[in-house]
Amino acid sequence: MGKKYNDSLKLIEKGNLYDTNEALDLVCKTAKAKFDETVELHLKLGVDGRHADQQVRGAIVLPNGTGKSVRVLVFAKDAQADAAREAGADYVGDMDLVEKIQKENWFDFDVVIATPDMMRFVGRLGRLLGPKGLMPSPKSGTVTPDAAKAVRDAKAGKVEYRLDKTNIIHCPIGKVSFGTEKLQENFDALVGAVIKAKPAAARGQYIRTCTVASTMGPGVRVNPAKLG
């Protein structure tokens, strides 16, 4: 680890569980990189994602956005395609874009949205988009009959949360430049959504551990008992 990282580490009390605002304040203070670092939230949940009835997945528009400029690709036709363009989509098309991804290995986009009628074509891209977390899904609101709204949400700072193989959710909640207050608002919104999505089959403590960290900084642990 570098000198800056080790200096940052000294500000964090080992083994301590912080209140959210203290933790986010420390994240901002320990972010020493020359660029505006992203702040991420990591939640380990007391569920077993291998079981369908214990999956935790959804999406939410963060109150203050993510601070990231998002490139949106939309698979749609006719009026839906026109509405998506008006809403600010970066790329709009149908089979032409399917072929471009297949033949050119083109991935110059961050979010993929599709109208339901296009999924029979988009489904062919499952093996390419799936591993990158880009496959449209009704659960995340990216397969929708209202493409324009989905584009506006994506541009406004919509984030998708889902369990990884170790039952942890990793999600950005903004940039260090947001400051503690705006990060806290985004944190509260995301944690609230995850709590609301608690599966009925979940047993015991739902949020096991909670950690916040900037891109290059050390993790700061939040007291999960105070998260509701």
Image (spheres, helix red, strand yellow):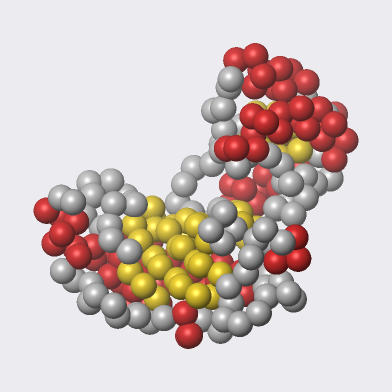
Residue 226 in view in this figure? yes
Vertical comparison of 16 with 11: above or below: below
* Relative image position of residue 48 (x, y in whole percent): 64, 65
Residue 25 coordinates in the image, percent (x, y): 30, 71
Tell me where residue 103 appears, x and y as whole percent: 65, 14
Image quadrant assignment for residue 23 = bottom left
Drawn side of residue 225 relative to residue 28, left or right: right
Does 209 appear above or below 120? below
Considering depth in this image, is 31 or 47 the residue closer to the camera?
47
- The quadrant in which residue 28 appears is bottom left
Q: Is residue 194 above or below residue 18?
A: above
The total of numbered circles placed on residues is: 0
Q: Which residue corresponds to the image point at 35% horizontal and 61% vertical from the top-left?
A: 213
For the point 38% across and 53% down, the residue is 38
Q: Position of residue 62 (x, y in %)?
A: 56, 61
Most foreground residue, 55 or 69: 55
Residue with the most extreme top position: 103
- Is residue 189 visible from the viewing direction of this image? no
Residue located 11% across and 53% down the image = 3
Q: Residue drawn at (81%, 39%), measured in percent from left and top?
A: 115
Side of 171 relative to 201 (left or right): left
Quarter containing the C terminus: bottom right
Judged from this view, the residue extending furthest toward the right is 117
Could you say which quadrant of the image residue 117 lies in?
Answer: top right
**For residue 18, above or below residue 98:** below
